Amino acid sequence: MQYKRVLLKLSGEALQGDQQFGIDPKMLEQYAQEIKGVVEAGIEIAIVIGGGNIFRGIQGAQGGVVDRATGDYMGMLATMINAMALQGAFEKHGIITRLLSAIKMEQVSEPFIRRRAMRHLEKGRVVIFGAGTGNPYFTTDTAASLRAVEIEADLVIKGTRVDGIYSADPEKDPNATKFENITFKDVYDMGLQVMDLTAITLCQENKLPIVVFDMNKRGNLLKLLQGEMVGTTVR
């Protein structure tokens, strides 16, 4: 295998499927099958899941519902709902998982402890990180980069519905060109919306590559981890 330990970042919206809101059981089933293939291949995998399908803190703040800090905490709780849904789907497929939360929730998860997370991975368990970083004003993209650095992952994988990084939004601009490889400097200079700048900077400073790929295409994740050219790599 090309990689020994990886961190997969999934957006909350990825769990919506064709719905406008919430969690689509078909997407949970599909992701469980994908992750099972990775585990059976002997790759250690951790997951950070967003909460945008339920609540996004910055939108709540902009809409005047709550202040930004409160909205972000609400968003962290949304990520825990998604994380528990993933855990349930994985375990139905016989995948051993551990859910670690940045906010203490002893009844449903373990607290995030770096060495404990790494030990779970060494034992072949899938580790799901919930509640972002545990701090407001940070996105789950940043949480993904931070956790990847902490657990000494070889790669950050961002699963999206697009098959890589383009010069423009390919769903809006038919002339957008896809990059196979791109540097962190190019991401900054071109203002590409790969991840937020804090997340990108964390990866750059720690020489941690990022791959953006289409998570919804069956088999893509395992192909990527086997070394095939899938998506776009940022180095």
Image: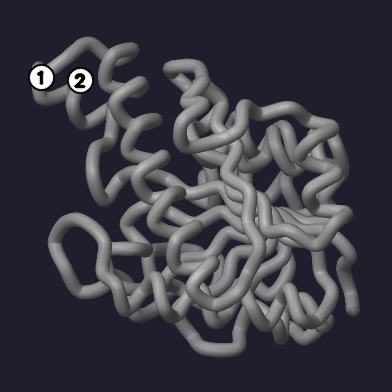
Q: Residue at x 45, y 68 (%)?
A: 89
The image shows residue 134 at horizontal and vertical percentages of 52, 21
At mark 1, the secondary structure is: loop
Q: Does the residue at mark 1 contact the one at mark 2 (Cβ under 8 Å)?
A: yes
Of 211 and 124, which appears nearest the observer?
124
Judged left or right of residue 85, residue 209 is right
Residue 65 circle label: 1
The image shows residue 97 at horizontal and vertical percentages of 63, 56
Q: Residue at x 20, y 74 (%)?
A: 18
Give above or below for 198 relative to 208.
above
Of 147 and 229, which appears nearest the observer?
147
Give above or below for 119 relative to 227.
above
At mark 2, the secondary structure is: helix
Quadrant hosting residue 224? bottom right
Pointer 1 local density, CA inside 10 Å: few below 14, some 14–19, many at least 20: few
Q: Amino acid at mark 2?
A: Ala
Q: Amino acid at mark 1?
A: Val
The image shows residue 198 at horizontal and vertical percentages of 61, 29
What quarter of the picture does the C terminus occupy? bottom right
Q: CA distance from mark 1 to mark 2?
A: 6 Å
Pointer 2 local density, CA inside 10 Å: few below 14, some 14–19, many at least 20: some
Q: What residue occupies the far front of the structure in this picture?
A: 107
Q: Is residue 177 visible?
A: no
Judged left or right of residue 172, residue 195 is right
Q: Which residue is mark 2?
A: 61
Q: Residue at x 32, y 38 (%)?
A: 78
